[in-house]
Image (cartoon, coloured by chain):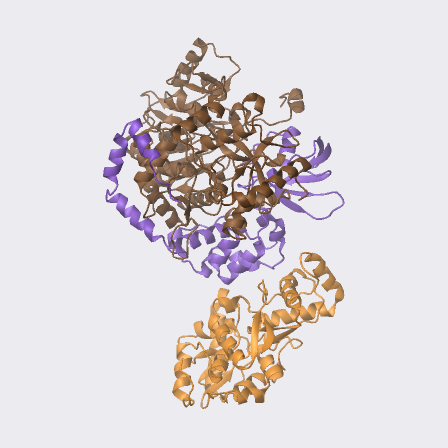
Chain colours: A purple, B brown, C orange
């Protein structure tokens, strides 16, 4: 057993639990601060310290094992305004990010955001890429972002990073990547009814006939 | 490496020893008859005593797992006599219950169909986006390559579902696929593409063509967050932490909205709506047959309960999907999804002795049954060749180092970055050591019966996503659940919008609940049974024993 | 080829792309290879003069650490504002070891900055490393007949301690322009501030400054203004008042590239002027 301090109060919990399970063991029935429980949604953003260590650590409660004396606090929601935009009206140029999120220019390159990221993303580099107008680089650097908000909470320049990244990724996907030609062709084919006859036939087949056809499929190697 | 315990490391030595010969090995696929035998012998759905026939309601007599029957045959949380229906808190054209993929898609298309954003309301149990949709990893199917077609996709779906799928629904699914992908492309979803924009597509379990589109292994997250961002751009209102605890009907017998409950302030809210879309997702947190789950915290089958009480039919609930590869070690990760894409990138499932024992990409139920057979002790009829962990969990290896060996160094970290990150957090490098897996409760194959427009048969009630059934028959293929929520979320949203344009809502009532309660009493259902569940309870037993509500 | 570590700054990657390309080509012709710092960050340019605000120096010092990590002790900037900012921070931490140790402690994710990185501006490089005579000897398309006004702006020469030259009587820009064969149009507003960031909140003030600067250059015979700062370049072009003389604006790097026979990426107005004025050099390529 070891001791975990949940919002300042100590509880004895078994070793090997994640922070989330330790809280539940201690008797918390989570409403806030619990989402996918698997590291994909950012609901369980947690900051903590360890005994004898002044450093402030940040991670996801569902993916972090408790340590003896760990002192935790949670951030289930980040107050951060998302800019108002319609994607079709945002030009995919660098200035777009700064225009919608001008506080980006306040970055002092202190790297606190990077240190706070539970996904270990190079967050400051993404801010720098945004300042340079390199949308594609922003999208690549921030792809694995789960929008937990820890960077935004700790940033001295009060940037709301994850909102900027969401816009950059959409701009990259919609405008900076070539459209799939085969996809457009196939959509037109479907609309024109090219597959209707075959689908009608399949829908009318009995189970045995379908089973035969299914077994006879050739599988792409 | 130091993190695997000694006994497990001995097995890893075997895995490494057989790897060179396995690199070129091909395991034959099972015939339909062989698949059937394997399922009957080892799939949890066939285990004696896991299910019972429903005693009440429109699907009376249908077999459903006990954990689900306990919720369907249960009394309401709110006493209908204590709910004041005269004070309406929200009056909308379209109410969407569930803020995951299907719900967001439904709301977007209702908007597209001309319903003003402020006449739509998404009510969700946790936050907007908290859902199984957010957690999906490997991909979404769509037949958009030249050598593929919706007809071939149809055959894959219907066969994979053991020929139990509704042909009209399967057709809708495969026909709408390419259009959905193109819609996503225009919204800015960053699908993996080649330099000229060609989609990079791979196989999933049971597919005959490589038509799985992915965004690394964060496909679900990438799509969900773009959809959510678009809903925010449109200004569609979302009420978070407000699950529905009952559907409302009116005196004409239509569904007319819902009673929501604020999880934090404990007040109930009345939403009157001309059309209601159910998009409540799956049932993983019921831990059917005691399995761990890949699902998110809120997956408690609430929508099935609500729909059943207004008379909607349910189908194929006897079919539970276990994902073959849930993490089995370390203990902190048990149950979490390891995407099929790992096997799509050629990592082989291997037993304790380093042997490849099944084709890596059989349909999910077959693959799961094979893993269960491999691990089950000899005396229980299995092969007894699983790896046992110090906490008593059992599993087989997924030989993940093969991915980089076959596809080039760095492939795993790039294409499977979420899995890589998951394990590196616990000091295991999947590019150098295999990972341990075992089936995990994953998907609700069946659900509320719908037509090809997402209509449940109850006036005013529509459904899309995991909550509905008939699309996947008795077994869903990988990549078709993301497709399902988009196709039927869209159809349900459009149908709801069309209905709302002419609908007239009469006096609100909970009479349907009262009628259902009479049926429960007549069937002598125990009074303590309440539903919907809303959230699972993982509090320590010691604490629960001393808990008392004093405030 | 001399390897010179190079700090681009944000403008060089976006708005002043042409200046960068031209300068790289010109310096290559002079035997200097620019090696961009890996993972550099914005210099945070032109912060307040308050001494106790250490945070402002973290960004600039981090870039100096990058230079150090390359095993080098000097770095070139093309932008006058980046030059000023990086040099001021270098000086700031050199002056007080305690400040440096606090900044190093804060940036615990980096190697410690040990000091000693020299920040160079293009003008300083041409004067001290290349040399005026050497520069002149490499000119293949002399800017004969072009009357160029050397516009320093403010951050190249101020504060005095970090300027590239004497702020009252600077001469490095003029010497470089002469080496390129141009006629220098001396004008009294050459070190006056264009208004810099006031262009965002008070563009009318900038317009007034620009009017005076351009009028002074024109009155002293200039037909081209040369600058080394993307913000000055922007103001001189975009904030020109509707009346009064107009002069084309070019970057130092672009003129340099032209004279050395490299790809100059000149803006159309400046290019037309230069092509129209200078005799075509024997065998030199047109852009």
Q: Position of residue C23 (x, y in %)?
A: 51, 76
Residue B33 position, x and y percent, is: 40, 27
Which is more toward the observer, B7 or C214? B7
Residue B19 at least partly seen: yes
The residue at 45%/58% (across/down) is A96
In percent of width and height, residue B319 lies at: 43, 25
Q: Is residue B413 above or below residue C18?
A: above
Q: Quadrant of the N terminus of chain B?
A: top right
Horizontal and vertical percent position of residue A178: 38, 56
Q: How many marks?
A: 0
* A172, B259: nearer the viewer: A172
Position of B461 compared to C32: left or right? left
Q: Is residue B229 above or below residue A19?
A: below
Question: In which quarter of the view is residue B40 placed?
Answer: top left
Residue in front for this viewpoint, C171 or B12: B12
Q: Is residue B49 left or right of residue C85?
A: left
Does residue C88 sit above or below B189 in this rendering?
below
The answer to whether residue A54 is left or right of residue B141 is: right
State which quadrant residue A63 falls in: top right
The C terminus of chain B: image quadrant: top right
- Confirm whether residue C244 shows in the render: no
- Observer-nearest of C226 and B537: B537
């Amino acid at each position: 057993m070891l001791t975990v301090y949940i919002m300042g109060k100590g509880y004895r919990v078994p070793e090997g639990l994640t922070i989330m399970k330790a809280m539940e063991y201690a008797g918390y029935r989570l409403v806030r601060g619990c989402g996918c429980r698997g590291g994909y949604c950012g609901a369980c953003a947690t900051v903590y310290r360890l005994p004898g260590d002044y450093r402030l650590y940040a991670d996801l409660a569902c993916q972090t094992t408790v340590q003896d004396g760990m002192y935790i606090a949670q951030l289930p929601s980040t107050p951060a305004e998302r800019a108002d935009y319609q994607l079709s009206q945002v030009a995919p140029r660098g200035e777009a990010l700064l225009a919608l999120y001008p506080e980006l220019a306040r970055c002092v390159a202190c790297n606190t955001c990077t240190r706070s990221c539970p996904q270990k993303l190079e967050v400051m580099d993404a801010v720098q890429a945004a300042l340079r107008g390199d949308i594609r680089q922003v999208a690549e650097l921030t792809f694995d972002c789960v929008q937990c908000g820890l960077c935004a909470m700790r940033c001295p320049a009060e940037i709301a990073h994850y909102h900027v990244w969401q816009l950059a990724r959409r701009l990259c996907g919609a405008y900076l990547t070539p459209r799939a030609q085969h996809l457009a062709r196939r959509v037109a084919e479907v609309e024109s009814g090219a597959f209707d006859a075959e689908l009608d036939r399949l829908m009318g087949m009995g189970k045995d006939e379908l089973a035969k056809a299914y077994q006879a499929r050739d599988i792409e190697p | 490496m130091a993190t695997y315990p000694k006994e497990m490391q001995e097995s890893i030595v075997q895995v490494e020893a057989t790897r060179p010969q396995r690199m070129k090995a091909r395991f034959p696929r099972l015939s339909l008859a062989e698949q059937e035998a394997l399922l009957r012998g080892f799939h949890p759905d066939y285990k004696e005593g896991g299910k019972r026939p429903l005693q009440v309601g429109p699907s009376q007599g249908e077999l459903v797992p006990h954990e689900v029957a306990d919720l369907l045959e249960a009394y309401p949380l709110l006493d209908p006599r204590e709910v004041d229906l005269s004070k309406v808190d929200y009056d909308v054209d379209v109410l969407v219950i569930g803020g995951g993929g299907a719900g967001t898609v439904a709301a977007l298309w209702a908007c597209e169909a001309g319903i003003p954003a402020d006449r739509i309301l998404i009510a969700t149990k946790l936050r907007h986006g908290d859902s199984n949709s957010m957690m999906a990893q490997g991909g979404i199917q769509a037949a958009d390559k030249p050598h593929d077609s919706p007809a071939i996709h149809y055959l894959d779906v219907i066969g994979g579902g053991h020929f139990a799928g509704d042909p009209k629904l399967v057709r809708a699914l495969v026909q709408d696929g390419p259009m959905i992908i193109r819609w996503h492309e225009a919204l800015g979803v960053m699908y993996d593409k080649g330099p000229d924009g060609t989609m990079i597509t791979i196989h999933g379990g049971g597919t005959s063509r490589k038509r799985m589109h992915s965004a690394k292994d964060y496909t679900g997250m990438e799509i969900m967050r773009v959809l959510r961002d678009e809903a925010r751009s449109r200004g569609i209102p979302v009420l978070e932490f407000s699950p529905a605890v009952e559907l409302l009907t009116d005196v004409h017998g239509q569904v007319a909205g819902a009673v929501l409950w604020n999880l934090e302030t404990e007040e109930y809210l009345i939403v009157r709506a001309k059309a209601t879309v159910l998009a409540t997702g799956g049932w993983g947190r019921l831990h059917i047959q005691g399995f761990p789950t890949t699902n998110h915290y809120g997956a408690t089958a609430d929508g099935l309960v609500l729909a059943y009480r207004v008379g909607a039919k349910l189908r194929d609930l006897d079919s539970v999907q276990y994902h073959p590869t849930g993490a089995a070690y370390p203990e902190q990760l048990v149950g979490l999804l390891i995407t099929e894409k790992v096997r799509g990138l050629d990592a082989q499932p291997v037993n304790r002795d380093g042997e490849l024992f099944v084709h890596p990409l059989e349909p999910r139920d077959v693959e799961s049954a094979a893993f269960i057979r491999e691990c089950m002790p000899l005396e229980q009829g299995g092969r007894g060749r699983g790896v046992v962990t110090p906490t008593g969990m059992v599993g087989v290896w997924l030989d993940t180092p093969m991915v980089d060996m076959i596809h080039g160094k760095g492939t795993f970290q790039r294409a499977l970055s979420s899995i890589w990150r998951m394990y590196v957090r616990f000091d295991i490098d999947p590019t150098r050591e295999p990972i341990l897996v075992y089936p995990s409760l994953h998907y609700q194959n069946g659900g509320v019966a719908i037509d090809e427009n997402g209509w449940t048969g109850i006036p005013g009630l529509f459904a899309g996503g995991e909550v509905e059934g008939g699309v996947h028959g008795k077994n869903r293929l990988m990549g078709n659940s993301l497709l399902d929520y988009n196709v039927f979320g869209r159809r349900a949203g459009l149908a709801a919008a069309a209905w709302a344009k002419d609908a007239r809502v009469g006096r609100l009532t909970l009479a349907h609940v009262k009628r259902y309660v009479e049926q429960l009493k007549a069937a002598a259902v125990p009074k303590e049974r309440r539903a919907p569940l809303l959230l699972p309870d993982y509090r320590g037993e010691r604490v629960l024993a001393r808990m008392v509500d004093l405030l | 080829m001399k390897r010179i570590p190079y700090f681009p700054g944000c403008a060089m990657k976006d708005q002043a792309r042409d200046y960068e390309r031209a300068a790289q080509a010109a310096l290559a012709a002079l035997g200097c290879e620019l090696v961009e710092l890996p993972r550099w960050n914005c210099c945070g340019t032109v912060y307040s003069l308050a001494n106790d605000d250490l945070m402002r120096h973290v960004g600039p010092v981090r870039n100096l650490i990058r230079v150090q990590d390359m095993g080098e002790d000097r770095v070139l900037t093309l932008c006058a504002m980046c030059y000023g900012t990086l040099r001021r921070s270098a000086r700031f931490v050199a002056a007080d070891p305690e400040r440096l140790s606090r900044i190093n402690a804060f940036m615990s994710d980096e190697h410690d900055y040990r000091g000693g990185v020299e920040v160079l501006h293009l003008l300083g490089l041409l004067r001290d490393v290349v040399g005026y005579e050497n520069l002149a000897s490499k000119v293949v398309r002399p800017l004969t007949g072009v009357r160029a006004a050397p516009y320093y702006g403010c951050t190249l020469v101020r504060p005095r301690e970090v300027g590239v030259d004497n702020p009252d009587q600077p001469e490095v820009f003029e010497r470089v322009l002469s080496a390129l064969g141009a006629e220098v149009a001396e004008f009294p507003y050459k070190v006056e501030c264009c208004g810099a960031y006031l262009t965002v909140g008070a563009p009318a003030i900038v317009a007034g400054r620009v009017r005076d600067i351009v009028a002074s250059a024109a009155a002293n015979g200039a037909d081209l203004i040369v600058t080394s700062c993307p913000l000055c370049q922007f103001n001189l072009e975009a904030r020109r008042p509707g009346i009064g003389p107009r002069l084309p604006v070019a970057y130092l790097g672009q003129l340099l590239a032209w004279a050395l026979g490299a790809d100059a990426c000149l803006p159309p107005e400046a290019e037309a002027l230069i092509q129209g004025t200078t005799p075509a050099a024997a065998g030199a390529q047109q852009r």
